[in-house]
Image: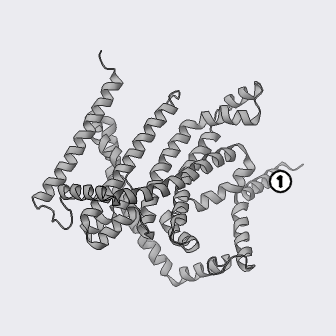
Amino acid sequence: MNVAADRLSAALWRRLRRCYSVLLMLAIWEGAARGGLVNSFLLPAASDVLANLWRMVTEGQLLYHTFQSLMRASAGLGLALVLGIPLGLIRARSRLANSILDPILAFWFPVPKVGLIPIALLFFG
Amino acid sequence: MKASAVQRHQRGACIAGIASLILFIGSWQIVTATGLVPDDVLPRFSDVAVTWWQLLISGELVRQTASSLSRQAAGFAAALVCGVSLGIVMARHRMVDDLVGPLTTVILPIPKAALIPLVMLWFGIGDAAKTIIVFLGTILPILVSTYHGAASVDHVYIWSARSMGDDERTLLWRVVFHAALPEIMSGIRMGLIISLIVLVGVEMLAGQGGLGWLVFFALDSGAYRVTYAAMLTIAVIGFAYDRLFLMLSRRVLHWAEQNP
């Protein structure tokens, strides 16, 4: 009765349990696409998609676009942190600031920010 | 009768809100009327207000709003039902969690803007595609909150209910659902807000009517006043939904220790 081996296989089981459904989905995807169940125009085979992904990575275009997106996202996040954290702290410490900021934020929070894209385009080109 | 502290606070918040609104509108009007910001970039608030009124009485605004809200309502309702039930089942049954959990962790967090082309490829540009995208976007916060709420139910509650003879179904309703309700309501609130955001986004990209489509159509046509009028409508709807939901939430959860 090897306790260490038991513990090891229990850990392996747990790992397997966590990821089997994703692997199953990939298998079904591949099977459905190759087996002709789904139109191959609408859903290319998983292996094809992955091969294409690898090609795009090694050719460099994917990294370039990913970098662009990450830069913009980080810049936005950075700006939001710089403004948001101090404002949050001020709100917590000052009753007056809270009552001023609260209605503004309450109105701002549910606004779909995608709706602001036109304004941003108009203002910043 | 002297108002209680809570009532005074609420009245103060209301006044502060109205004051901020007046300040916002006032500064908008001043900045544009004095020519600080050119008229083609930011129309005057008075012009936007007039255009908004014209849109309203011509019926256009009502038509587009009804279009948008019906899609949002369908997607949100479906996400609510599926999200809450799936979340509770996942929290209570490990096998379901193992099967569905990893898939939701991989697929659902994908920004819906990225899924739009794929969904449109499969389902076209009609209402079905938009409702599906709203559904996918909304279900994530609801599912996550429900799962977390249901999984964090104090075991003592469950044990005592079981010891009093509750079977699994009664247990689910009386104990798990109610104990998790504060967190579920908080997740639903996020879902509501996200449903509007995703809706407007997909309407902007896919067209075919709705407030989001109107914003971009007016932008392309150079009718900037219509753009701003539509955007203000979207903002007001989002704000109203949120406030109404918070009021509903307070009533439903009046017995809970903390409010969302």
Q: Nearer the viewer, residue B106 or B32?
A: B32
| Placement of B16 over or under A12, stated as above or below | above
Mark 1: amino acid: Ala
Residue A99 falls in image quadrant: top left
| Placement of A102 over or under B50, stated as above or below | above
Q: Nearer the viewer, residue B224 or B181?
A: B224
Q: Label 1: which residue?
A: A5
- Within 10 Å of disc 1 (Cα), the crowding (few <14, some 14-19, many 20+) is few
A28 relative position to A61: left or right = right
| Secondary structure type for disc 1 | helix
State the residue lying farthest toward the top: B1
Residue A115 falls in image quadrant: bottom left
Q: Nearer the viewer, residue A92 or B192?
A: B192
Residue B151 falls in image quadrant: top right
| Placement of B68 over or under B21, stated as above or below | below
State the residue lying farthest toward the right: A1
